[in-house]
Amino acid sequence: MTPRLSRRQAMEVLAGAGAWALVSGCSSSTSTAPTDDKPSPQSEVTSAQLESEVRDLHLRLSARAAEAEIVVGLSTSVYSFDAEVLDGDPASVTPSASYLGPTLHVHQGQRVKVSFENDLSEDCIVHWHGLTLPQDQDGQPGDAVAGGETYEYDFTVTNEPGTYWYHPHPHGSTGEQVYRGLAGLLVVHGDEPDLPDGDNDLPLVLQDRTVDADGQLLYVANRHDTMAGFVGDTLVTNGVAGFTVEVRREAYRLRVLNGANSRTQYLSWSTGEPCHVLSTDGRLLPETTSTAGVIITPAQRTDLWIDFSEFEPGQQIELLVADTFTESGGADLNLVGQVAARFTIIDSEPVPSVLPTTLSPTLPIASADAVNTGSPKQFVLSTRRAAHWINDTQWEGRVATEVETVTAGTVELWEFVNESPMPHPMHLHGNPFQVVSRAWDNDSLAQTWASLEHGIVEGGLRDTVLVWPGQRVQIAVRFAEHLGYFLYHCHILEHEDGGMMRNFLVT
Ligand code: C2O
Ligand code: CU
Ligand code: CU
């Protein structure tokens, strides 16, 4: 295995598109011919073995106030992450074209140091969503630093290659800080099967914003926004409204992050093409899954594969997103989406590709391995007294009940029981899980679910799971070796800030 980070090419900004191409350059040394769908072997390599082969990376990352053009012709005050490579491959940071933080490129096994500077006038801390890290590297509310202060991270990336992200996590203001612009993609590179890379590997961060006539961002205005979750009136992709990108007549990998505060979205193509799903929450699926549309909750990621070779030059194809919000469910969902991103096919030689099928030989976590098979731990989600609750408790800092105490290295079955009238995307820090089953306590809500169920892709691992009202969702979690407190919470950021967040304690 050779270091790959240095093989990246320069960033390509596509003229007039307000877009940038993500550079991965991580072409696999174990590439397979298009007709040979055998996966590359993923050998069990320890982080120590990997570490010696990849050059360390040291970044300075700051959070600061800035101006951005979200809507054409308007200047908007935002918060923004800014990064600089202090030591390591300069291509590890690819800037965004708007308020979003740069995409950070790290490598499985790499030692990464980040000097985080909080240049805001409020507390902030950076969480690496999806990465498995020790407690003091996880970016938790308890580690938030005041404006003007810094936090030093120093960790080794042990996660599988895939799409992750970073965002702030100070308690009570995560929603507003993410909304003002603090978020960015984090791509873990490493050995993967032969997938589109380089210019054909594009980030798509889906968000929504309400921008007033003066160009300023409007956030939570009333109790409804806090209780239901804030929804912006304009779809913003990669930080810009009306996002358009030019693509060649080739296959692409689209790294989609739902970076919205509260919208659970249904993705589909304007042409009626199936969505070919490669990964969920950063990890490749065992096999590519093709569906008419894909559900993606806040914080979830999904990599889509699409071959533009059959389109004509000048043709456009749109990625549509429909909001699936429901309160007390029941009604049929309207899954006809609005345009989130427009792909314009440029005049180029068509290079048809074969859809990759087998992706990752990694075995999912087996529920049979759980220490509590047959008696899952219950986490009841409820809504009352103008708040959302987990087991009748709310945020209490670094505190864990008995049910929230787990043993490192074991697999446990957890069951989220949604007695609240609205869906909650539940996230666990640092410990990916397998969705085991869904059952119903309230059948009348199963009808709404039926219209979107085909878009639920859960054959691989996840770090965030949608729990529909009336539903019980069982997950099998393998707790990593890192001891200490780790968060689990609803990733509707207004719910999280409102206290729908707790810790589990790994002992
Ligand atoms: Cu995106 Cu506590 O996480
Ligand atoms: Cu997280
Ligand atoms: Cu919630």
Image: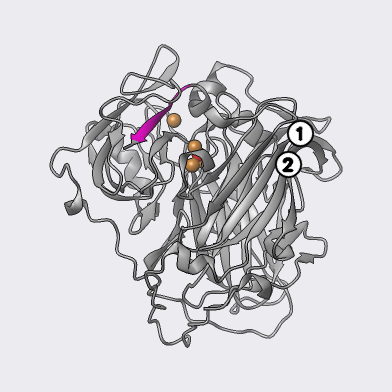
**Region of the chain picked out in magenta, as a range:** 499-505
Q: Mark 1 points at which residue?
A: 119
Residue drawn at (63%, 73%) of the image? 25
Q: Mark 2 points at which residue?
A: 62
Q: Does the magenta stretch include residue 399?
A: no
Residue situated in front as seen by the camera: 457 or 390 = 390
Q: In this view, does 403 lie above or below 253?
A: above
Q: What secondary structure is found at the residue carrying circle 2?
A: strand
Quadrant hosting residue 120: top right
Badge 1, how many Cα within 10 Å: few under 14, some, many 20+? some
Residue drawn at (39%, 73%) of the image? 42
Q: Do the residues labelled 2 and 1 touch (CB within 8 Å)?
A: yes
Q: Is residue 359 above or below residue 448?
A: below
Residue 317 coordinates in the image, percent (x, y): 62, 64
Residue situated in front as seen by the camera: 158 or 320 = 158
Quadrant hosting residue 85: bottom right
